[in-house]
Image (spheres, rainbow, N blue to C red):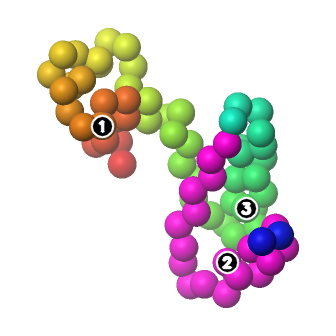
Amino acid sequence: MRMDELMDDLSKQSSFLLAIDGMSGSGKTTLAQSLQEKWHAHVFHMDDFFLPLEMRTPQRLQQPVVMCIMNAF
């Protein structure tokens, strides 16, 4: 699917969740900013939710999701 087709399909929805994945420097943030401006969307960067080193306790590392601060959502 081309980008213009995707944008057309998404613009017909009342709401949607879109996850953007890619390697470092691939343009994820640029794409997110473009979509945010077009649709006045909310953008959440996973970088904001990575677990800081001081919070990586043995108890927390036993939980299923260990690298994110789940209560931040």
- Circle 3 or circle 2, nearest the eye: 2
Q: Say if 12 sits above or below 72 in the image.
A: below
Along the viewing direction, whichever of 44 and 66 lies nearer the viewer? 66
| Residue contact at pointers 1 and 2, CB within 8 angstroms | no
Circle on res. 15: none
Which tag, 3 or 2, sits closer to the chain's start? Answer: 2
Looking at the rendered structure, the number of numbered marks drawn on it comes to 3
- Circle 3 or circle 1, nearest the eye: 1
Residue with the mark numbered 3: 35
Q: Farthest top residue?
A: 54
Span colored in magenta: 3-22
Question: What x and y, as percent, mark residue 25?
Answer: 77, 33
Circle on res. 65: 1
Amino acid type of the residue tagged 3 in the rendering: Leu
Amino acid type of the residue tagged 2 in the rendering: Leu
Task: Let me know if residue 17 is in the magenta part.
Answer: yes
- Mark 3 lies on a secondary structure that is helix
Question: What x and y, as percent, mark residue 31?
Answer: 76, 52
Q: Say if 66 sits above or below 73 in the image.
A: above
Q: Is residue 3 left or right of residue 17?
A: right
Q: How dense is the environment of label 2, judged by Cα within 10 Å: few (below 14), some, or many (20 and up)?
A: some
Q: Say if 12 sits above or below 58 in the image.
A: below
Which tag, 3 or 1, sits closer to the chain's start? Answer: 3
Task: Let me know if residue 19 is in the magenta part.
Answer: yes
Residue with the mark numbered 2: 10
Measure the alpha-carbon separation of dots 1 and 2: 30 Å
Q: Is residue 72 left or right of residue 33?
A: left
